[in-house]
Image: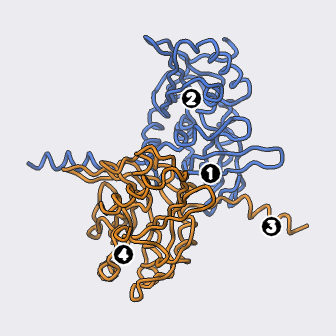
Chain colours: A orange, B blue
Amino acid sequence: NPREIITKKANIRIKTALSKMFNAMAKVSYDIDESDGNVIVNTAYIEKQYYDEAVELLKEAYKQYLGISDRFGIVEEQDKIKIQTICAVTLDGIFLRNSIPVIPRYGGILEITEDKERFIDIIGYEGSSLDPHEVFFNFVDCEKTFLAGFREIHRVAREDLENVLKKLNWRGVKAIGEPNNELYGINVNKDMCGLVTMGGINPLVLLKENEIPVNLRAMHEVVKFSDLISYKDL
Amino acid sequence: NPREIITKKANIRIKTALSKMFNAMAKVSYDIDESDGNVIVNTAYIEKQYYDEAVELLKEAYKQYLGISDRFGIVEEQDKIKIQTICAVTLDGIFLRNSIPVIPRYGGILEITEDKERFIDIIGYEGSSLDPHEVFFNFVDCEKTFLAGFREIHRVAREDLENVLKKLNWRGVKAIGEPNNELYGINVNKDMCGLVTMGGINPLVLLKENEIPVNLRAMHEVVKFSDLISYKDL
């Protein structure tokens, strides 16, 4: 039965984080002219008893610019609360829709202190099946250490990227490097620029840091941007 | 002061697991003719109260062929017991001493059941600063899931590798793939063969599974092989 063999084969090949990201990017339909469309969100489930505390902490997180945009989702489900935060892969999808090729490289921990900003740990998207930010979630505090990603763009696309970012007017991009220059402790390939993005999961770190148990799934759902709410309207 | 700038630069570049492995490989001096020389070990500290139980569990682990060779170290230090298990990077070092180029690719979790053997999660050595097996340690049980590594060798070196392994007469190599063939769910590059190695940390998983708190450091020390002891002599 050849079908069985095919099913088995398909079943055992391991999927990398990069492959999952390209899959997610293809689902992004957010249009920077209309300021709406589909975005990719991380989801986190918490117990209902933490609702009020969680909303206050999320407002605080977004006020501190820890989110990718100013919006997130908060949905009551049977016995749980589901929180949705926009995932940085949404940015990759938006760049792609605007014909800017961005290559996701690493997820990691970014240390930010007064005199330096640098990655202290990274995991490569291409060589890994795990989502790096799920691995690092418990090792950051969003005071000195933050979840962040590292991407590469070719120097010819740098100006276009800056224009899209200006029009998009979100947060999430922490730094764009010069061509061929190391950025935050990470080398880039010939003619490429580094791009440091903040992780979409950071707002949820504040819940974890305040002893709210969080059941987390990175890059988990597709939602319409306009179905999310701005922290300013809460 | 240009010195300060240099120091700062050197300080902030991130080191990958692969770079640490090449560094460790260079310290291996084990000679397959003399059956002795320096090897790389993982270290684990446990409390003294667990000494007897730990020795029994380690004997059991090595009887089940969970170690890279039949030897490990057990050293009393002030208020702790230090256990040393040979790290799979020792194999890379031995191959290199015998002029066989092996490229370490991934550390991961190998699932072994009656009808299939496959990797279910991997982290690439090249793109990561963390040791994958430190990340995966708490997610394997050494019953169905094991710490394992994936390496690549060129087809021209396959026969030499098999000869060295025969002469070495250790355990640790689980499978060698055919050129260009996927192995245990992982693709290889053109003209390369996959090589699946068991993780040197697996014997310590049995301690963790039996509720003995383990303070683990992968690829931590260099010791002389003859300073280690065979489980058969305990």
Residue hosting label 2: B86
Q: Residue furthest bottom?
A: A33
Q: Nearer the viewer, residue A191 or A103?
A: A103
Q: Is residue B35 left or right of residue A83?
A: right
Circle nearer the viewer, 4 or 2? 4
Instruction: Measure how far apart labels 1 and 2 are at the Cα level.
Output: 23 Å
Q: Considering the image in quadrants, where does the C terminus of chain B appear?
A: top right
Residue sitting at 41 percent across and 70 percent down?
A71
Circle nearer the viewer, 2 or 3? 3
Q: Nearer the viewer, residue A226 or A201?
A: A226
Instruction: Measure how far apart labels 4 and 1 are at the Cα level.
Output: 31 Å
Q: Residues within 10 Å of mark 4 (few under 14, many from 20)?
A: some
Q: Residue furthest left?
A: B1
**Which is nearer the N-term, disc 1 or disc 2?**
2
Percent of width and height locating residue A213: 51, 46
Kind of residue at disc 4: His
Which image quadrant is residue A173 in?
A: bottom left
**Which is nearer the N-term, disc 3 or disc 4?**
3
Badge 1 and badge 2 both on one subunit:
yes
Instruction: Measure how far apart labels 3 and 4 are at the Cα level.
Output: 38 Å
Residue hosting label 1: B121
Q: Nearer the viewer, residue B190 or B87?
A: B87
Residue sitting at 58 percent across and 13 percent down?
B51
